[in-house]
């Protein structure tokens, strides 16, 4: 008997749901759009877990749209499966206007599962994170998923493909690790040098001795085979003008988590509250990501 090759250890022992998604029908549900590639329920759940692991915290409504094409019933089935397996947990967050919404966060087991699924999907270097996310930061963190998704859509529309996404927690961890190693081996001055070197390797700009860390960094290969990075920043209402200007000057793709934040970004960059002339963000970057 021919022995099948071993599967990824993190993918062994899984039980796949073989229930059909339901017959095609007419209606407004986007999962029945004939122009989109068909995905099985299992494939949608895999995408659900991959995204939550890569971003650590994602709004359920965004997962419904992106992974289940707007079908809430199928999404909740997927969420229930992921919870039963111990891969994700639910949290409640508040948006800029005070409204409550559900956030899905990755567990340690879920992060391991997500990394295995990313390897299977062709992103072997994609890290997944778990751990507590402060309630006050949830609304901002889930907006990062939308912003990175918008950046990815632009890259793919131009013929490129995304090879990895790093959120700020991973980037800060890499910087801190390099800095601490140098400090222990040599001195505080060596730690500063190591931090700047790490920033250069990661494609992170330095302003006045301070490394500017984006909310997410999207690494990609363009249509010509060249590698690149897109640093994504989501501004919220409490962002200061100096911080906005520094990150925009460094080439960050700026987004806003609410209309008020968008107005603050435009004012900081000289575009006024209405985003008119005067050096404001290009129109394509004046996106408002409202929860």
Image (cartoon, rainbow, N blue to C red):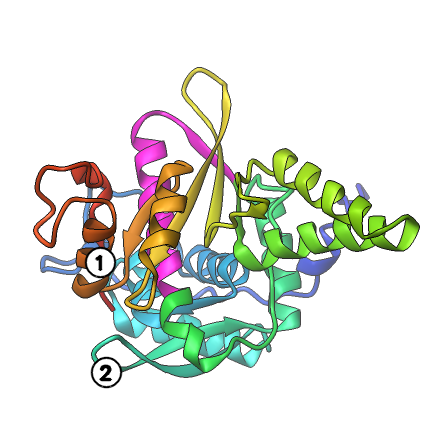
Viewer-nearest of discs 1 and 2: 1
Inspect this view and state whether residue 287 appears: no
Q: Residue at x 8, y 42 (%)?
A: 276
The image shows residue 74 at horizontal and vertical percentages of: 32, 69
Q: Which mark is residue 58?
A: none
- Which residue is more in the foreground, 262 or 139? 262
Residue 76 figure quarter: bottom left
The image shows residue 138 at horizontal and vertical percentages of: 42, 74
Q: Is the residue marked by circle 1 packed among few (<14), some (14-19), or many (20+) residues within 10 Å?
A: many
Q: Residue at x 64, y 42 (%)?
A: 124
Q: Which residues are magenta?
A: 142-163
Residue 150 belongs to the span the image colors magenta: yes
Q: Which mark is residue 99?
A: 2
Residue 282 figure quarter: top left
Residue 101 left/right relative to 4:
left
- Which residue is more in the foreground, 85 or 278? 278
Residue 81 left/right relative to 97:
right
Residue that mark 1 sits on: 264
Residue 166 left/right relative to 268:
right
The extreme right residue here reads: 185
């Amino acid at each position: 008997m021919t022995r099948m090759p071993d599967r990824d250890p993190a993918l062994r022992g899984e039980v796949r749901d073989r229930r059909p998604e339901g017959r095609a029908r007419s209606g407004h549900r986007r999962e029945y759009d004939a122009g989109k590639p068909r995905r099985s329920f299992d494939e949608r759940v895999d995408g659900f877990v991959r995204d939550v692991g890569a971003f650590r915290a994602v709004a359920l409504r965004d997962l419904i749209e992106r992974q289940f094409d707007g079908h809430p019933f199928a999404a909740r089935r997927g969420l229930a499966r992921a919870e039963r397996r111990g891969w994700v947990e639910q949290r409640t967050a508040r948006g800029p206007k005070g409204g409550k919404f559900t956030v899905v966060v990755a567990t340690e087991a879920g992060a391991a599962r997500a990394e295995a699924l990313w390897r299977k999907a062709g992103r072997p270097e994609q890290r997944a994170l778990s751990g507590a996310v402060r309630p006050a930061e949830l609304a901002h963190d889930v907006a990062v998923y939308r912003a990175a998704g918008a950046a990815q859509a632009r890259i793919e529309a131009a013929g490129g493909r995304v090879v990895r996404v790093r959120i700020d927690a991973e980037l800060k961890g890499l910087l801190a690790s390099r800095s601490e190693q140098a400090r222990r081996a040599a001195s505080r001055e060596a730690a500063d040098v190591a931090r700047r070197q790490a920033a250069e390797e990661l494609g992170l700009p330095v302003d006045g001795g301070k490394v500017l860390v984006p909310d997410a960094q999207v690494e990609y290969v363009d249509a010509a085979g060249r590698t690149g990075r897109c640093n994504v920043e989501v501004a919220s209402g409490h962002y200061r003008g100096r911080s906005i200007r520094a990150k925009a000057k460094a080439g960050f793709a700026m987004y806003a988590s609410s209309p008020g934040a968008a107005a603050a970004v435009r004012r900081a960059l000289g575009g006024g509250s209405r985003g008119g002339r005067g050096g404001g963000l290009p129109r394509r970057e004046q996106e408002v990501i409202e929860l």
